[in-house]
Amino acid sequence: MTIERPTEAALDRAATRLARGELVGMPTETVYGLAANATDPAAVAKVFAAKGRPAVNPLIVHVADVTRLAEAVAWPLDPTAQAQLDALTGFWPGPLTLVLPRARSIPDAVTAGRPTVAVRIPDHPVALGLLARCPFPIAAPSANRSNYVSPTRAEHVADGLGQDVAMILDGGPCRHGIESTIVAIGGPDGPRLLRPGAVPAEAIRDRLGGVLRIENVSTVTPHIAEVSRPPDRSSLPSPPPASGAAEDASAMEAPGMMGRHYSPRTPLRILPPQGPSGDRSRCGRLAFAPIPESEASRYALVSVLSPSGDLREVASGLFAAIRELDRRGLEAIDVDACQETGLGRAIMDRLRRAATEE
């Protein structure tokens, strides 16, 4: 395994390796992905094996542009789905994933046997350059062991999956730092938010004329950090699974819906409303904005994600900071929280799934 600068020659080599059924670490604007030929069942099986990923957890498929959606999506779409797709394509390239009817060329393993596929167009020059070189779509879940903290730098991929990938393309730190927003469109229940992410649900709802159901998002009553916040029906046809296999009733509708996810080895706790309590001298603190010295001095280590509490900076550095604190042999990690609006919804979703149950 090598970490390589994304030169034209390196991108050519990466595309060749994907065509051979090998795995490649690929940067995107959200997190690094474990890339494989999405139409090659053997390559897809390597993704699940490398990650230790449950077979019921589907993968996101990446395509180069809107004209290549038919590589992953059954075409033509139902008129309602097409209208909703048209309303949302302004977010592409970008961190929005849409759940649509799958093309027959997409194997069962990619979709966990479901008749739909999660698809997006990434907004990263390296990912787009690689996709442009491949005559197939790319399946690319986060390039980490299943349930561990998502990777936002090339070295994170090497640390966790270095022995499983043919090469890693180093595109630098990921801009958004958390995964894409996932929305199912077209169905009888209307557009549904399945996973909050880097595109705020409010922005998606606005594009859809005020219609978006928010699902699978619980609420907490955490210690709220003081932060400044950036501004913020008809059924689809359901093609049968490509191999003719029956849909698995336990299969998840989209990635990122597991209750336990993004978790460090060190116990992580979302601070309660009253703030920290007890002896924290062997603990780390992940703060969204600077905290008073009287509070910081109680901790062995404090990592501040943003000098102003900007949630975009918080999201961008969140996973990297958790990984760094996880390396320090701490007893526990205390983490701030924020209001669950805009980008805060996605941040809190990740933290709840990462937190240790008490």
Image (cartoon, grey):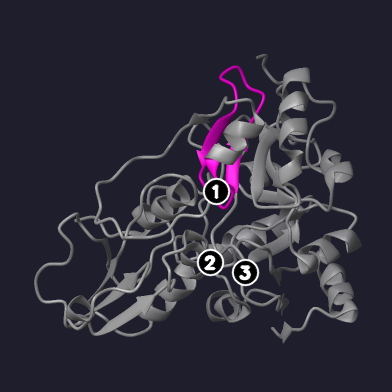
Upstream in sequence: badge 1 or badge 3: 1
Q: Are marks 2 and 1 in contact (CB under 8 Å)?
A: no
Q: Residue 25: x percent and y percent?
A: 68, 71
Span colored in magenta: 181-201
With 251 as the anchor, is 323 left or right in this view? left
Q: How far apart are marks 1 and 3 (CA)?
A: 27 Å
Give the amino acid at mark 3.
Cys
Judging by the rendered image, the residue that carries numbered circle 3 is 174
User: Furthest residue to the left?
Assistant: 278
With 58 as the anchor, is 276 left or right in this view? left
Judging by the rendered image, the residue that carries numbered circle 1 is 55
Q: Residue 351: x percent and y percent?
A: 37, 57
With 287 as the anchor, is 283 left or right in this view? left
Residue positioned 69% across, 56% down in the render: 44
Q: Residue 264: x percent and y percent?
A: 38, 69
For the question of whether residue 191 can be seen, the reply is: yes
For residue 248, above or below residue 330: above
Pointer 2: residues within 10 angstroms few (<14), some, or many (20+)?
A: many
For residue 40, above or below residue 214: below
Residue positioned 57% across, 71% down in the render: 152
